[in-house]
Amino acid sequence: MRKSVPVLWMSVAFGVELALAAAVLAVLGTGEKSVRVALDVTARWSFLLFWMAYAGGAIAALFGPALAPLARRGREFGVAFASAHLVHIGLVVWLWKILGRIPLQGGVLVFFLVAIVWTYLLAALSFGQLSEALGPRLWRLLMFLGLNYILLAFARDFVLGVIHSWDAHRYFWQLVNYAPFASMCIAAPLLRFVAAAQRRRPGGDYPPPNPIAAST
């Protein structure tokens, strides 16, 4: 039964993201601007799933046992994020086809490709016994590097969106569109740092986070 749970989460997360993209394209059309709106919407749904995988355990540690299920569901949130994000990647490919060129260039493209590699590497390692074969030290290192790199990729997009929203030619809603997610990018590592500090205090009770690739 436990092994079937991630599959359900992955299916639901993928279905929601696919429905969001389809709704945007059905209302706005299938041109470049519409695809870019769909990219914005799907990126935010993916990010919410990733954020819960990244920070759920820390939130549970800091705000009490009522939120303990968040710590236990880190793996499900993580693989759900990886599944849902396939729709976002598909939209990027679609935009590439419309433009006749890759939407991102040079170092920016490589930066985001590395984030994609991390996403599906950690997701793949979350199934079976692969994480155990790596050993706990290497496994924790991979999780730390991968999760924070993915967070940095999201932060780059959202924080730059906030910066650009201050341009005189931009609208207030541009700020609203990006600021909450940029704030979450900043808050996530802070929450984990504070939770880790609490764990190290005498008598501290800290359930370890179960992020995107927690072993079964």
Image: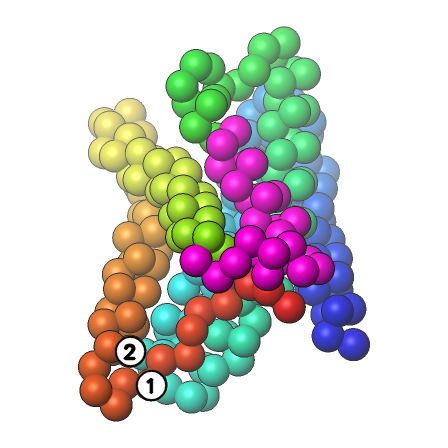
Is 163 above or below relative to 176? above
Residue situated in front as seen by the camera: 148 or 38: 148
Is 176 above or below relative to 211? above
Is most of the magenta stretch helix, strand or loop?
Answer: helix
Residue 154, percent from left and from top:
42, 42
Kind of residue at disc 2:
Arg
Q: Is residue 107 left or right of residue 3?
A: left
Residue situated in front as seen by the camera: 173 or 214: 214
Residue occupying image coordinates x 31% and y 57%: 189
Residue 16, percent from left and from top:
68, 54
Q: Earlier in the sequence, mark 1 or mark 2?
A: 2
Q: Which residue is mark 2?
A: 199
Is 110 above or below relative to 21? above
SS under mark 2: helix
Q: Are marks 1 and 2 in contact (CB under 8 Å)?
A: yes
Residue 106, percent from left and from top:
43, 14
Query: Rounded to the nearest whole Å, what is the CA distance between mark 1 and mark 2?
Result: 6 Å
* Quarter of image, res 41: top right
Kind of residue at disc 1:
Asp
Q: Is residue 82 left or right of residue 65?
A: right
Residue situated in front as seen by the camera: 191 or 1: 1
Residue 205's disc number: 1
The image quadrant where one finds the N terminus is bottom right
Res 108 visible: yes
**Magenta stretch in the rendered image:** 113-137
Q: Is residue 192 magenta?
A: no
